[in-house]
Every structure is written in structure tokens, then in C-alpha cells.
């Protein structure tokens, strides 16, 4: 009797990747079609915690151990500072659930190993997404009225500004243009290191994914795509990469100096916000004000920028943000990740979270895996990627596959 093939852990998460893509497409058609998966999706962080504990079984590498330690302290500090600021238990537990998403999913993918066949399956998924997205993009650009009628629940209603023109943002099979832009970016990074495709197919696929990313008109994602391609090019010459690293350190130093100046003289940042009156700049400004008003300790969860602040409290209507158009329309920017860390957990929470992130990055040996991990945090400047199941699953899967490719190359290089 032949034994039935059992679903492995990588296979389980591969099914989850396919489900995220499929149900994102169904969400374009109707929110009722997505509703069952939305309920199921809420259980994913809890399941990921159980799977992670099963895989680790008490055996922690140093990077993982320190990352879990610092993140645990970050969560503990968030609970304590929220309690001291008289936040309700409901607010604390609600935000705690959203905070757990990142550590549960990313650590699970960090400790999960896969074989080369999952790299090949990932390339097939990339090809399928590309082949399905291109006709939909052409349909959206050529017959936008009919497209909007068919996919009335899609995020494509937000127009992109190019010069003086307002153009529709391409979404392909996904619900929101950011999802297509991120998937295209991750696919290009994976394709750049794949050796199984022919010399003609790989450049063609990279070109088509780049075109898809451009048509989304997502400025941050396009900037990160250019930076990623440049970083991958520099990997061919380690001397150039070394020089580029020093340039990166200079950028970080300038960024740190800017952050310090904002804390010392917040009026400087207020003037910048007034010259760039975007919702995200305002919420960053308000988070800094909240930080200063709390004497750098943080005001606790449910104050500004978090899911709890938008869903469970009147934080937005009681602040200077209440007059902004996106608050009046209910479009709360709790999907901008870092403001809630700055304003709600203060400098202690921010430092603990950054330490946890740095430690987890040291778990990866491959350049592409670290690059994808770094992109995840950069995109969270303008989005909720660190608390979105879709983005965490996509980033985690591509990190796992890229890390496997790097480990296989290392093994082959040291083989006798």
C-alpha cells in the first residue's frame, strides 16, 4: 500500500500564500466573498505562534533568542505603559493581538527551512500572477468604467498623480495597487538569483514585473525597487558594495540627526509638516507631539496611530487630526506603523522594537533575504505591512525561499 503524501509545513504556508492571493481577488468582486477568509485570517497569528513553538522546541539560535527577548520586553512595556495611562483591558488586549502578528509570522518563516522545489513552485506562482494580472491591467486601462463596475470593491478607485494627470493605479489580481507593487518587487528579487530560467525568460519576466510595478504608481515601492536593483547589481562587485554601505551609514546618520532635532526642537518639524500637508506627515507630527507630552515614556496603546486608537477610542476626534479629510471620511491612518510605536510606547518601546528587528535580521545569511526583510520595514513607513497578514505572509514566504537559495549556494560552494 502506497503511503499518502503528507502536507509539510512549507506546503501549509504555500497554501496560505495562494489563499491570500485568491481571496484578495475575491475581495475585488465583493466584500461578502472575502468575509469567510477574513474570519479565518484572524486565527493565523495564533496558529503561527503554535507552529513556531513546535519548530523551535526550546532550541533557539542566538539571533532568534535575543529577538524574542527584546520583542517580549516591547510587548510588556506596551502593556505596562498602557495600564499606567489608564487604558482599558479591552484596548490593551485588542492592540496586543495586532502586535503579535509580526513576531509570530516572521519568526516562523525565519526558522522554517524548505527545499529547492518550493523555489520552483514560487516561480510558478509569480508566473501565474503575471499572466493573470496583465490582461486585467489592460482591461482597467482600456475600459475603466466597465472595470470599476465589475470590481466595485477594489482599491483601484484611488488615482495616481503623474505630473498634471490623474491615472488609474494598476492592481492586477490584487485588491490594492500596493499589493501588486510589493509582489512585483519581491518577484524581481527572487528572479534575480534564480538560475533555472533561460537567459531570455528571466529578463523578460523581470521587465514585465517592473512594468506592473510602474503602472501601480506607488512612489515608495518604485523607489525601493530602484534601490533593490542597484543593491543587487552592487553584489557583483563587493568593493562597490562596501563603498555603498558607508554611504548607507551616512544616510542613517543624517536620519538620526533629523530625529534628534525633531525631539529637541519640534517646531522645525511642524514647519516641514505645514509645507507638506499630507495625512501621513500630520500623523507623524502628532505622534511626536504625543511623545513629548508623555515625557518620552509614551501615552499607551489606543492613543494615536494604532488599530485600537482607530477602532476602540475617540482618539482622532479628540485631537488636532479631527479636521483632516481622511478622518472625516473614516480613513484613519492606523495603517502607518511607526507613529503608533513612537507616540504610544515612547523611546523605551521604540528602542526595544528596533533591537528586536536588528537581532532577527542577523538570523539570515543570504543577501536577498536581508534585503527583503529591510524592505518590509521601509514600506511600513507608509503602510501597515508589519500588522497586515497579507504582507507578512508574502514577505515571510519570499524571505524563506531566498534564504534557502543562499544556503544551498553556500553548501555547494563548500562541497568537496
Image (cartoon, grey):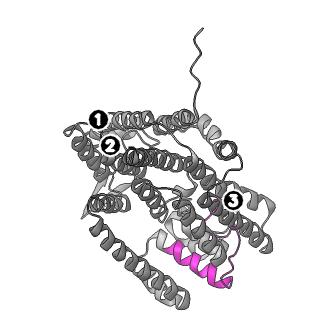
The reply to whether the magenta stretch includes residue 298 is: yes
- Label 3 residue SS: helix
Closer mark to the observer between disc 3 and disc 2: 2
Q: Quadrant of the N terminus?
A: top right
Q: Could you tell me residue 129's position as x and y percent? A: 37, 37
Give the Cα distance between marks 3 and 2.
39 Å
Vertically, is 32 above or below 381? above
Count of marks overlaid on the render: 3
Q: Would residue 310 appear left or right of 114 to someone viewing this image?
A: right
Residue at image x 47%, y 73%?
Answer: 281
Q: Would residue 345 appear left or right of 225 to someone viewing this image?
A: right
Mark 1 touches mark 2? (CB < 8 Å): no
Vertically, is 12 above or below 42? above
Q: Residue furthest left?
A: 200
The quarter of the picture where residue 243 lies is bottom left
Q: Could you tell me residue 264's position as x and y percent? A: 54, 91
Q: Residues within 10 Å of mark 3 (few under 14, many from 20)?
A: many
Closer mark to the observer between disc 1 and disc 2: 2
Vertically, is 5 above or below 140? above
Q: Which mark is first along the chain, 3 or 1?
A: 3
Closer mark to the observer between disc 1 and disc 3: 3
Which residue bears the numbered disc 1?
Answer: 135
Q: Quadrant of the C terminus?
A: top left
Read off the magenta span. 282-311
Which residue bears the numbered disc 2?
Answer: 194
The reply to whether the magenta stretch includes residue 234 is: no
Which residue bears the numbered disc 3?
Answer: 95
Q: Which mark is first along the chain, 2 or 1?
A: 1
**Which circle marks residue 104 in the picture?**
none
The quarter of the picture where residue 352 lies is bottom right
Give the Cα distance between marks 1 and 2.
26 Å
Q: Would residue 213 appear left or right of 97 to someone viewing this image?
A: left
Amino acid at each position: 500500500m502506497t503511503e499518502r503524501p503528507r502536507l509539510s509545513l512549507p506546503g501549509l504556508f504555500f497554501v496560505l500564500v495562494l489563499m491570500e492571493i485568491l481571496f484578495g481577488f475575491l475581495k475585488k468582486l465583493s466584500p461578502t466573498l472575502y468575509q469567510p477568509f477574513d474570519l479565518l485570517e484572524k486565527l493565523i497569528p495564533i496558529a503561527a505562534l503554535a507552529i513556531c513553538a513546535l519548530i523551535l522546541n526550546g532550541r533557539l539560535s542566538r539571533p532568534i533568542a535575543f529577538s524574542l527577548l527584546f520583542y517580549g520586553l516591547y510587548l510588556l512595556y506596551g502593556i505596562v505603559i498602557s495600564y499606567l495611562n489608564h487604558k482599558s483591558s479591552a484596548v490593551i488586549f485588542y492592540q496586543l493581538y495586532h502586535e503579535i502578528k509580526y513576531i509570530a509570522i516572521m519568526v516562523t518563516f525565519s526558522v522554517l527551512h524548505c527545499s529547492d522545489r518550493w523555489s520552483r513552485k514560487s516561480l510558478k506562482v509569480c508566473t501565474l500572477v503575471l499572466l493573470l494580472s496583465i490582461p486585467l491591467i489592460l482591461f482597467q486601462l482600456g475600459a475603466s468604467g466597465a472595470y470599476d463596475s465589475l470590481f466595485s470593491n477594489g482599491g483601484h478607485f484611488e488615482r495616481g498623480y503623474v505630473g498634471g494627470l490623474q491615472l488609474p493605479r494598476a492592481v492586477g489580481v490584487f485588491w490594492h495597487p500596493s499589493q501588486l507593487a510589493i509582489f512585483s518587487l519581491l518577484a524581481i528579487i527572487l528572479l534575480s538569483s534564480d538560475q533555472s530560467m533561460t537567459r531570455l525568460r528571466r529578463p523578460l519576466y523581470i521587465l514585465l514585473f517592473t512594468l506592473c510595478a510602474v503602472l501601480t504608481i506607488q512612489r515608495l515601492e518604485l523607489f525601493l525597487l530602484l534601490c533593490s536593483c542597484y543593491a543587487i547589481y552592487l553584489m557583483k562587485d563587493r568593493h562597490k558594495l562596501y563603498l555603498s554601505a558607508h554611504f548607507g551609514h551616512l544616510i542613517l546618520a543624517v536620519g538620526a540627526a533629523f530625529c534628534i532635532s525633531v525631539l529637541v526642537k519640534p517646531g522645525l518639524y511642524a514647519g516641514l509638516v505645514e509645507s507638506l500637508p499630507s495625512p501621513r506627515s500630520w500623523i507623524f507630527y502628532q505622534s511626536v507631539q504625543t511623545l513629548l507630552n508623555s515625557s518620552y515614556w509614551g501615552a499607551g496603546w489606543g492613543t494615536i496611530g494604532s488599530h485600537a486608537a482607530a477602532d476602540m477610542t475617540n482618539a482622532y476626534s479628540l485631537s488636532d487630526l479631527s479636521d483632516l479629510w481622511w478622518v472625516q471620511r473614516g480613513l484613519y491612518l492606523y495603517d502607518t506603523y511607526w507613529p503608533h510605536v513612537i507616540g504610544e510606547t515612547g523611546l523605551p518601546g521604540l528602542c526595544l522594537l528596533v533591537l528586536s528587528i536588528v537581532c532577527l535580521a542577523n538570523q539570515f545569511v543570504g543577501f536577498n533575504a536581508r534585503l527583503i526583510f529591510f524592505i518590509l520595514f521601509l514600506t511600513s513607513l507608509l503602510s501597515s505591512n508589519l500588522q497586515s497578514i497579507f504582507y507578512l505572509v508574502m514577505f515571510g514566504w519570499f524571505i524563506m525561499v531566498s534564504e534557502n537559495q543562499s544556503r544551498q549556494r553556500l553548501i555547494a560552494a563548500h562541497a568537496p
